[in-house]
Amino acid sequence: MVPPRTLRGVKVTVLVALSMAILGAILAKAYDRFVAQPRLAEEAFDIQRANVPAPDVPLLGRDGKPFSLSQYRGAVVFVNFWATWCPPCREEMPSMVQLARELAREHPGKFRMVAVSADSGWPEVDGYFAYTFRGTPQELVVALDPEGSVARAYYCTARGVCPDIKFPETYIVDKAGRLVAYIVNSRDWTDPVARRFLERLIEG
């Protein structure tokens, strides 16, 4: 016959083991949901990681004056290099604008989207936005980079080498002013993966 004290010890040991197993299953499920699955989704979306200071190079604003992206420090900045003569750029722009509107509405002051055009002048850019959106969307900061110097700075900084410049390409700058990711070629920016990735940076 097993003494009562020994039985109690066995029960406690079994309960502890069961509790640890349940906790382990919960943690494994949480890791899968909040870490593993998002990573796989980001890989499928092809988000390339980086971790370097964002280039602080001047852009030409719509008012004709130069400005720097460093003035948006404290917000997550989405920098897209594009051109009106680039079909994939034109195709992705509506989904970009939709994303900008949603994030601006839900995270006021914490997200900025900058579209840097390689066009030679404003008539082409203004014409595109007038035709597609009936004017430049207010959630979008539009800049010109006709010489490609800003695009080259971002392309080279993100990779550590200087490839041929192709459009479109998108760069993500975090609140501290670090270039943390880039995405090559066009995307559907209404994809939940993109929004989750950006919101983690916004809320982090």
Image (cartoon, grey):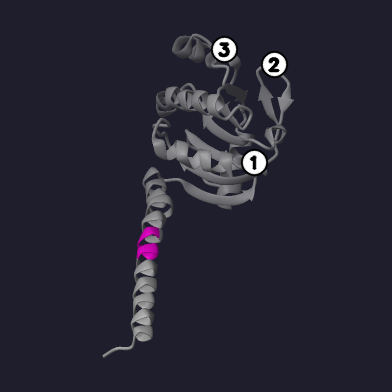
Asked if one can make out residue 41 in the rendered structure from this viewpoint, the answer is yes
Residue name at image x 52 percent, y 26 percent: 100
User: Which disc number belongs to residue 63?
Assistant: 2
Based on the picture, tell me whether residue 23 belongs to the magenta stretch.
yes
- In the image, residue 175 sits, relative to residue 106, either above or below, namely below
Q: In the image, residue 85 lies at what x, y percent?
A: 46, 22
Left or right: where does residue 99 sit relative to residue 111? Answer: left
Cα separation between marks 2 and 1: 25 Å
* Residue 187 is a magenta residue: no
Which residue lies under the disc numbered 1? 175
Q: Secondary structure at mark 1?
A: loop
Mark 2 to mark 3: distance in Å? Answer: 13 Å
Q: Which residue is denoted by mark 3 in the rendering?
A: 123
Q: Position of residue 33 (x, y in %)?
A: 38, 51
Q: How many marks?
A: 3
Which quarter of the figure has residue 117?
Answer: top right
